[in-house]
Image (cartoon, rainbow, N blue to C red):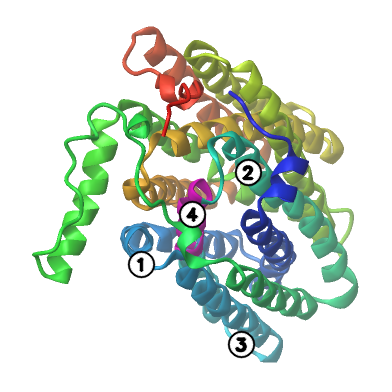
Amino acid sequence: MNSVTYKQLLRGNLNFRRLWIGQLISELGTWFSFIAELGTVGMLSGSPLATMALLVSRLLPVLFIAPFAGVLVDRASRKKVLIAMDLARAIIALGFLTAGVGGPLWFIILCSGMMSASTTFFEAAKNASIANMVTRDEMLTANILMFSTRFLQLTLGAALGGVTAARFGYKAAFIINSLSFIASAVFIWLIPDPVMRRREQPAAEIETGAESMASPSSGPSSGNRFLIEVREGLAYIWATPFVRAVIIVNVTWALGGGMNNLIFDRLSRHQFVTGAADRGDWNMAVLTTAAGLGLFIGMMLARRAGMWAANERRAAHFIGWSLLVHGLIFAASAFTHSLIMVAVCVAVSRLILGAEFGLQETLVMRVVPDLYRGRVFTTDRALELSTMALSMLIAGPMLTRVNPMLMMVVSGLLSASPGAWWLISMRLRTFSVPSHAIRDPDPVAT
């Protein structure tokens, strides 16, 4: 799979560079805020069920918002959606400050839910736009750079957020987060609207089975049109075996991955605390930083993985074995009984997952036509996050009775299971990686 270097991409593609810088700033603020939000809920309640409610509030809205987001970004100006959601999130971020003036716990959870809903629209528009802003040779590098810097920001934001929470309190983190969204909106405003949408879809990118899908047409009322477009997106997914398999893998992974933050929070605030004055913020920052650092390094290695996956068989095996091994390593971390060793295992597990995700996301982006891209990505994300919410709802009460180390084993084995399913399905030829997702098309005279 051919791909340009990071330097070539950032030097040669001004519009992508603007989008990337905007996310670089906003993601740092997001992870600053995440540590502060967990600490605020712990301060107001102290119950793991309250932490569970906060985390579920970040996931559950996606299930209801995603269908609207997918249709909107396939229909409307993606630039306007991105800017509007950045400004909305800047306002919502300030809502967390009410905790310092007697604001109730339920309002903090509500703000978290509204932030998640706004982010769903933003991510749908961003993911649908990237493939149109870059060339085919830039696509893998762009995905790696976009997601790897997100995970780097998770690492830096979690670490700095832990320090900020310990020294300056939570208000500073919430204000920084709000300002970061405004900065992101400024950079996106500089991007021309037309570059975020494909003029026409190359026939080579449409997989067999998708040709029969009808294009949006005028006629029905807007309400009926919306339902028709949702059904068209779902029909495309069902008719495209590879895309369907990727979504199944992501949803199955979420059964185990969804409970990770709850497990980290329980380990940080109970298992590894050093005294009565220790609120566990630093422990949480260590585990979150380890996860982010592993994902960042893994994403940076995804370009090499893409070069190695030079054919359909290699790409398929890389996805399956990566998912299987990363889950087993995560499960094994439960037997270390040390914060540092758990953090190391988490980092290695996430390194493998990051490399797999970078390749997987690029393959899907190459396969799905622009006409369906917003709906496919939001459907995938909605089902994944909804499953994560279900995982949390189950794990939250269990963590009040079960040792969190045992829950790490459960989480790891569940996260490994989609890798086993993928490898078995490939062996049975249930689906395959499309050739045009891997091989670059022969040049044709225009």
Residue furthest to the front in view is: 445
Q: Quickly name the residue at label 4.
A: 129
In the displayed structure, 196 sits above or below 411; it is: below
Q: Decide whether the magenta segment is chiefly helix, strand or loop.
A: helix
Q: Quickly name the residue at label 3.
A: 103
| Element on which disc 1 rests | loop
In the displayed structure, 65 sits above or below 353; it is: below
**Residue at 72%, 59% in the rendered image:** 24
Task: Please name the amino acid that badge 3 sits on.
Answer: Gly
Task: Please name the amino acid that badge 1 sits on.
Answer: Ala
Residue furthest to the left in view is: 219
Mark sitting earlier along the chain (3/4)? 3
Q: Quickly name the residue at label 2.
A: 142
Left-right relation of 287 to 308: right
Marks 3 and 1, how far apart at CA: 37 Å
| Element on which disc 2 rests | helix
Marks 1 and 4, how far apart at CA: 12 Å
Marks 2 and 1, how far apart at CA: 23 Å
- Between 39 and 9, the one lying in front of the other is 9
Task: Please name the amino acid that badge 2 sits on.
Answer: Ala
- Circle 3/circle 4 CB separation < 8 Å: no
Marks 4 and 2, how far apart at CA: 12 Å
Mark sitting earlier along the chain (1/4)? 1
10 Å crowding of disc 4: few (<14), some (14-19), many (20+): many
10 Å crowding of disc 1: few (<14), some (14-19), many (20+): few
Q: Quickly name the residue at label 1.
A: 76
In the displayed structure, 290 sits above or below 329; it is: below
In the displayed structure, 298 sits above or below 262; it is: above
10 Å crowding of disc 3: few (<14), some (14-19), many (20+): some
Mark sitting earlier along the chain (3/1)? 1
Marks 3 and 2, how far apart at CA: 41 Å
